[in-house]
Each structure stands twice: as C-alpha cells, then as structure tokens.
Image (cartoon, rainbow, N blue to C red):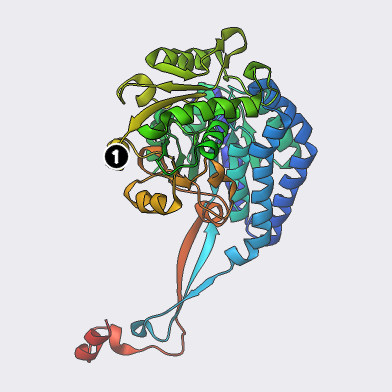
C-alpha cells in the first residue's frame, strides 16, 4: 500500500471510529449539523459563486438557481421532517406471530463515500451530503479536479465547518480516486458518466459495498403535433443552454413531428436570442465548455448534420453557440454518445410509434421530455422508461425536493432528494419484540395441534 492509500485509509478509519462511538445517532446532533451546513452555505455563498464563474462562466443568478438554492431547499426539507422520518414505524403483525409486535426502524449505514462531478460541483456534492448527515452517517467527499477553483473553496468550507473524523473532503486526480476506491465504505454515492460508473461498481464489488450511481445518457425530447411551439422552443432552448448544455438531464436530442419542424426552428432561434441576446458569446448568463478537450469533442459533432440554428464556436474561449442541427438518422456519434454540450440534434417523425420504437431500442435515459397535449403525454409515458420525466417542460423536475431523483438501467441506480435521501443512507431494520411472560408452545417440536398451526401459516 502506497503513502497516499495509507493516508486516505487513516482518514476513513478515523471516521469509522467516530461513527462507532454513536455520536452521530441523536437526531439533535444531526439537525445541528444540517444547520451548520446551511450557515456555511450562506457564509461561503460569494466565494462559491465566484469560483463557479471562473471555472464554468456561470453567472451569479445561475449559480444560485442551479446549485446553492437547491441545496438550501434540501436542508430545509430535512430539518422540517427528520424527526418524523427517523421515528420507528409500527407495522401489522400477523396472527401467527401473536403476541409479538413489529416495527421498522432506520439506522445509518455508517461511513459513506460521495464522489461529485464537475458540471454542478456544489449541488451534486452537497445535496447527497445532506442525506448522509440526516441519516446519521459520516462522509468522505471527493470533488472534481476539472473545476479547481470550486474544489478549493469547498475544501476550505468543509474544513472550517466539520471535524474531519466526521466529514472530510479530498481533491485530486485519478490517483486520489484510486486510493479512495480501495477503502471499505458502507455506501458509495457516485455521480458521473456511465463509463466511470463501471469503475466505481467494480471497486465496490471487492467489498460488496452498496452503490448509488447517478449517471446520465441521452435524454430524448419529443415535440408532438399538439405542442405549443413557442412555449416548447423556449423551454427546450433554456434546458439546452443552461450551463452550456453540460447537464446530465439536458435535452440530448429532439424527435419532432414533421409538421412542426420549420416552425420550431424559427421559434428556437428566437428563443435563444430572447435568452442570451443577438450575440450569445457576450451573454453574461451563458457558460463555457469546462475544458479544451470537452470543447473539441462537442464542436466535432457539428460536422455530422445540417445546421438549422447557431453553430458558431471560438476555441480560445471554449465557446460553442447553442445549436439546432438536423441529422439524417440515429447512427452517427452525435446520436450515440451523450453530447454534454449545447448541440441539439433533430430528427423528424410522422407517427408516434416511430418515437416509441426509436427510444425503446436505446439505453434507458435519465430524463425524458414530452411537449404536446398533456393527455397524449400521459398516455405515452408508461410506454417509455426513464429516470424522470416532464410533460411540457425540461429539467425542472430536479427542483422538487419531494420527488425522487435517479436513473434506471444505463442511466443509474438508486435515488435521492428529500425522504429518498434519508432512506438512501439508511438501513431499514425489521424488529420483532416478543413478550417474555407468554410463550405459546405451537412453534416448538413436536408441533402439536399441527392442523391448527397449518391454517394460521
């Protein structure tokens, strides 16, 4: 074992010792820590927003809307409901177990590893942390090196707020990931690409550690013949341009009824101008690709179709204009790989059955968006499986902390937000309590009155 692994292992072991002390079990302790996190978010709001601007060119408003406010709402939700969630739940006891009583209690899993991605580095690190604190776990956090300014602020914030034998944060590259994944945890919570999800799951299998994988994939957007085109175009343009398309639940490709293609193209172009002005590159609310590598990958997709709107790029600033692009079929790279950028490929259809076939033959996405009459959307959704969905909207389902968020199949496993976050880091434990003063003989050998016992089974 090298020095880095020994160093990380010692930190993880210190958390296990702290957890074993029982210090995290009282509800009062958990609520106090949630309040500390809320206070830290308020205190470090400006440094976090400034760092997000440096790393991703996020405006203050977007940083608050998509990162900090979501964590703040999650904390408030847990503070309101934690005592109720943590209370033992009485459940029915069948006659055959009389006179016993049954209940389900929740207890923290233990020490959790939370690995966050770079695209929403504050929200996707701290939102799971809220669940870990609420459940009574200790937590080892890992930031992404792709956003160094944000990572540095988070290191300082967490270090000033919590003792490291309770919550600690690591920054670093692949060697740090390797050292972290060598340790034995009680849960690994990973947000990132399906490719890295395989690596995390392989590491977890060495210790039979349960995992929550929040991955991604190609989230389809359907614009049906009954859609309000202006509304659809504006909401899709917003969903695709926020964070420069670097969102795991961004609309990844568009399936549009052939009768609506021309109108939508015009409306999409207009919507982008309303959101960002006539020169998107000058918009204070439009982000940039996180790296040169990301820029080159996403810009390379532009050659795979006919540009209907947008298409301008600037390598020196890693700028890619929001782009609507018509493609001939679903077989090019842009239709096979998760785009993770502001390019929206478009395919036309004439019959909704074409849409069902196209989507169902592909890996299950993290999100699905339908624009059209709500009645038709409600009929269609049961036939299409995705992690989450919106009818006549994009992305906003993630903002409701009372709804579960998570993937299915290739887009992930497990879910969180609100009560689901509390359960995610908890073990639901069945407890049967049997009185000592009454001991019915029926269950003991030689099983007298077997006929009666059989009827009770």
Which residue is at the front of the view, 261 or 181? 261
Give how far across and how far down residue 164 sits, in percent: 67, 39
How many numbered tags mark residues here? 1
Q: Is residue 365 left or right of residue 426?
A: left
Quadrant of the rendered image containing residue 422: bottom right
Residue at the image point whose x is 31% and y is 89% from the top: 441
Give how far across and how far down residue 371 sits, in percent: 45, 42
Residue at the image point whose x is 65% and y is 22% from the top: 55
Instruction: Residue under label 1, please give it.
Output: 351
Query: Given the current orientation, which residue lies at the most extreme right position?
Result: 43
Give how far across and how far down residue 429 sits, in percent: 47, 64
Which residue is at the front of the view, 375 or 83? 375
Which residue is at the front of the view, 232 or 286? 232
Seen in the picture, residue 103 relative to 300 is either above or below; the reply is: below
Residue at the image point whose x is 54% and y is 36% from the top: 230
Q: Can I make out residue 135 in this image? A: yes
């Amino acid at each position: 074992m090298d020095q880095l692994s020994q160093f990380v292992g010692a930190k993880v072991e210190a958390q296990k010792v702290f957890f074993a002390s029982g210090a995290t079990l009282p509800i009062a302790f958990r609520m106090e820590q949630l309040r500390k996190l809320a206070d830290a978010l308020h205190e470090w709001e400006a440094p976090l927003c400034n760092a997000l601007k440096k790393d991703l060119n996020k405006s203050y408003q977007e940083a608050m809307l998509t990162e900090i406010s979501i964590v703040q709402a999650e904390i408030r939700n847990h503070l309101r409901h934690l005592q109720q969630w943590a209370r033992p739940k009485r459940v029915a006891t069948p006659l055959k177990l009389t006179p016993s009583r049954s209940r389900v209690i929740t207890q923290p899993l233990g020490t959790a590893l939370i690995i966050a991605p770079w695209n929403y580095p504050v929200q996707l690190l701290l939102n799971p942390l809220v669940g870990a604190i609420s459940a009574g776990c200790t937590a080892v956090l890992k930031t992404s090196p792709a956003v160094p300014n944000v990572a540095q602020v988070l290191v300082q914030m967490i270090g000033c707020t919590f003792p490291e034998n309770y919550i600690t944060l690591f920054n670093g590259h692949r060697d740090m990931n390797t050292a972290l994944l060598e340790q034995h945890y009680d849960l690994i919570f990973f947000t990132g690409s399906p490719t890295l999800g395989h690596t995390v799951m392989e590491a977890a299998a060495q210790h039979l550690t349960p995992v929550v994988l929040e991955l991604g994939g190609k989230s389809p957007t359907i614009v049906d013949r009954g859609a309000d085109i202006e509304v659809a175009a504006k909401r899709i343009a917003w969903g695709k341009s926020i964070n420069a398309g670097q969102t795991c639940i961004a609309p990844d490709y568009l399936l549009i009824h052939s009768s609506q293609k021309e109108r939508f193209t015009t409306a999409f172009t207009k919507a982008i101008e309303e959101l960002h002005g006539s020169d998107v590159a000058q918009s204070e609310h439009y982000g940039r690709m996180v790296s040169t590598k990301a820029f080159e990958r996403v810009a390379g997709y532009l050659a795979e179709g006919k540009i209907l709107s947008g298409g301008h790029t600037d390598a020196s600033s890693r700028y890619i204009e929001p782009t609507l692009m018509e493609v001939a079929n679903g077989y090019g790279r842009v239709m096979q790989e998760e785009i993770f950028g502001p390019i929206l490929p478009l395919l036309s259809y004439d019959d909704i059955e074409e849409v069902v076939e196209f989507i169902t033959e592909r890996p299950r996405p993290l999100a699905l968006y339908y624009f059209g009459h709500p009645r038709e959307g409600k009929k269609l959704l049961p036939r299409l499986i995705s992690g989450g969905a919106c009818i006549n909207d994009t992305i906003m389902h993630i903002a409701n902390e009372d709804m579960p968020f998570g993937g299915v199949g290739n887009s992930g496993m497990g879910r969180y937000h609100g009560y689901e976050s509390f359960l995610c880091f908890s073990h639901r434990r069945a407890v049967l309590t049997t009185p000592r003063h009454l001991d019915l003989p029926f269950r003991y050998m030689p099983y007298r009155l077997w006929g009666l016992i059989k009827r009770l089974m």
